Image (cartoon, rainbow, N blue to C red):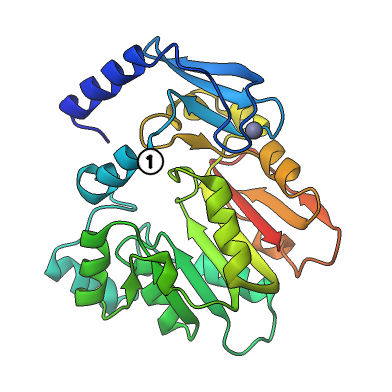
Amino acid sequence: MLTNAQRVSYLLDSMLRYREKVKCTNCGSDECTILDRKYVFTRLFECNSCHLYFRHPVERTEVNLKFYQKEYAEKDNITAEVPEPAQLAGLKETKFLKGNKNADRYSQIFQKLLPGKEKISVLDYGSSWGYISWQLIEKGYDVQSFEISKPRADYGNTHLGLNIVTNEEMLRPDVDIFFSSHVIEHHPSIPSMIQLAKKLLKPGGYFIAVSPNGSKAYRERDPFGFHKAWGKVHPNYLNADFYSSIFSNHSFYLGSSPFNIAGIAPLASSVKIKDDLSGEELLAIVKL
Ligand SMILES: [Zn+2]
């Protein structure tokens, strides 16, 4: 959620930059189609080439960085707020079983993709204060964590005993899974995020991204939910057409929430699976 001052500055910025050239933030194409609009001046475009949905005016990297250091605090308590000490003690005691931070569904997906593997190495990319990393370590995974926001990384390192790094150069390669939950929709450069995944993954490792779902099936089922989910904090709106396009040379599985864990299996070469895509969250699993 934005404060009123943030909202006003966002609207002013959108108004002043309304006439800026519309250009896809992923592939650079200027052939784009308008899909939706908010507050008159803020528009959602689809790139006709790679099918990314993106907000215009687009995010500027330096603004993005500042926003995540200080200003970003979602009121839904899923990603960005940090708990009070007593609350945290309770969460650790119950291993985050209750509430919206439970990571069991992710661990189940990892097990389905790499059955029988002893110590699966996972990079939790955009880990916030590390509640998912912590649970994965408890479950026996070999975990690295990266977070852009220093205050959140510090919190996780101090209170959960983690080693969250804020510099991508510090990350070790040869990971089995490059995992991100609600990160790619905020990212100022999807190509650089995917490039990093390619650099750090073992050959045949999995890129897994969970995000709001911009796919057509979700928009048809819940037009209001679709409209609400893009904007200032979500400049990219991921969807099945985009992933199918950019990963056309890879095996992938695309699904949505609630995740069909039973339907997930190791991806053989050249399989392209599109499961039910009408749920609120999009799940992309790509073998890189
Ligand atoms: Zn594009």
Q: Quadrant of residue 202?
A: bottom right
Total label count?
1
Please state, as top left, top right, bottom left or bottom right, where the N terminus lies in the image. top left
Q: Residue at x 25, y 44 (%)?
A: 66
Q: Position of residue 182 (x, y in %)?
A: 45, 50
Q: Residue at x 33, y 53 (%)?
A: 79
- Residue that lies at the very extreme toward the bottom in this rendered image: 118
Q: Position of residue 36 (x, y in %)?
A: 52, 17
Vertical comparison of 122 with 101: above or below:
below
Q: Residue at x 34, y 68 (%)?
A: 131
Q: Identify which residue, 2 or 221, lies in the foreground.
A: 2
Classed neighbour count for the residue bearing mark 1: other residues with Cα under 10 Å, few (<14), some (14–19), many (≥20): few
Residue 79 as seen in the image, left or right of residue 189: left
Q: Amino acid at mark 1?
A: Thr
Q: Identify which residue, 279 or 39, lies in the foreground.
A: 39
- SS under mark 1: helix
Q: Residue at x 19, y 31 (%)?
A: 3
Q: Can residue 74 be seen here?
A: no
Q: Position of residue 60 (x, y in %)?
A: 38, 35
Disc 1: which residue: 61
Where ligand 1 lies, by quadrant? top right
Q: Identify which residue, 62 or 150, lies in the foreground.
A: 62
Q: Quadrant of residue 219?
A: top right
Q: Can residue 30 be seen here?
A: yes
Please state, as top left, top right, bottom left or bottom right, where the C terminus lies in the image. bottom right
- Residue that lies at the very extreme toward the right in this rendered image: 270
